[in-house]
Image (cartoon, rainbow, N blue to C red):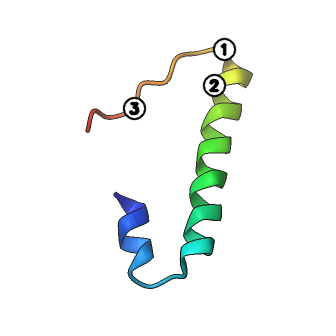
Amino acid sequence: MWADRLMDTKPFKLVAVALANKLARIAFALMRDVTHYAGKPA
C-alpha cells in the first residue's frame, strides 16, 4: 500500500492527513457522480 511506503520516510501525522485526504476525495467523487466504488481487490 502506498501509505506503508510513505511511512518509511514521512512522520505518522503527515501520512494520516494524506490518507484522510485521499479517502475524502474518493468519497466526494462517489457522491458527486452518484456511482459505486470499484476499487482493486486486496
Q: Please report the residue visible at 63 percent of the width from the left and 25 percent of the height from the top.
A: 30
**Which residue ends up furthest to the left in the rendered image?**
42
Mark 3 crowd level (few <14, some 14–19, many ≥20, 10 Å Cα): few
The location of residue 2, given as percent across then percent down, is: 39, 62
Quarter containing the C terminus: top left
Q: Quadrant of residue 31?
A: top right
Mark seen at residue 30: 2
Q: Amino acid at mark 1?
A: Val
**Which residue ends up furthest to the front in the rendered image?**
12
Q: Please report the residue visible at 55 percent of the width from the left and 69 percent of the height from the top.
A: 15
Q: Please report the residue visible at 39 percent of the width from the left and 32 percent of the height from the top.
A: 39
Q: Amino acid at mark 3?
A: Gly
Residue, disc 1 = 34
Is residue 39 or residue 42 the one in the foreground?
42
Q: Badges 1 and 2: C-beta atoms under 8 Å apart?
A: yes
In screen coordinates, is 5 left or right of 33? left
Q: Earlier in the sequence, mark 1 or mark 3?
A: 1
Residue, disc 3 = 39
